[in-house]
Amino acid sequence: MDESIYKIIELVGTSPKSWEEAVQNVVNTTSKTVRDLRIAEVRELDVRLENGKIVEYRAKVRLSFKYEKED
């Protein structure tokens, strides 16, 4: 039986437009350097304000990927 191990990392994505875009930015950027992404779990959403207006949407995202053992 092949046993799998997964690693979990937590990242924060940002967007001037939406939380959805902030999450997509995390996934798109991470997928360029990390192989075999499995799950993206949105942990926390918040916004950055300036002068009482939203200027940035932020999403804290947990990503899991399959851990590859070295031979």
Image (spheres, rainbow, N blue to C red):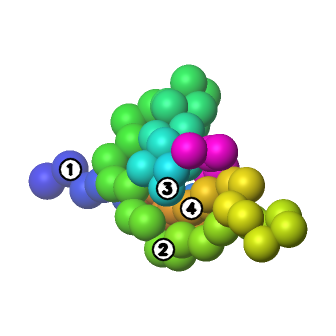
Residue under pointer 2: 43
**Residue type, mark 3 in image:** Trp
Mark 1: secondary structure: loop
Disc 1 versus disc 2: distance between alpha carbons?
30 Å
Q: Is 16 colored magenta in this rendering?
A: yes
Mark 3: secondary structure: helix
Mark 1 or mark 3, earlier in chain: 1
Q: Position of residue 4 (x, y in %)?
A: 30, 54
- The answer to whether one can see residue 6 in this image is no
Specify the quadrant of the image occupied by residue 52: bottom right
Which region shows up in magenta?
Answer: 10-17
Answer whether labels 3 and 4 touch (C-beta < 8 Å).
yes
| Mark 2 crowdedness (10 Å alpha carbons): few <14, some 14-19, many ≥20 | few
Residue under pointer 1: 2
Residue under pointer 4: 59
Of 58 and 18, which appears nearest the observer?
18
Main SS category, magenta section: strand
Disc 3 versus disc 4: distance between alpha carbons?
6 Å
Q: Is residue 9 above or below residue 36?
A: below
Disc 2 versus disc 4: distance between alpha carbons?
8 Å
Specify the quadrant of the image occupied by residue 36: top left
Mark 4 or mark 1, earlier in chain: 1
Answer whether labels 4 and 1 touch (C-beta < 8 Å).
no
Disc 3 versus disc 2: distance between alpha carbons?
12 Å
**Residue type, mark 2 in image:** Arg
Residue under pointer 3: 19
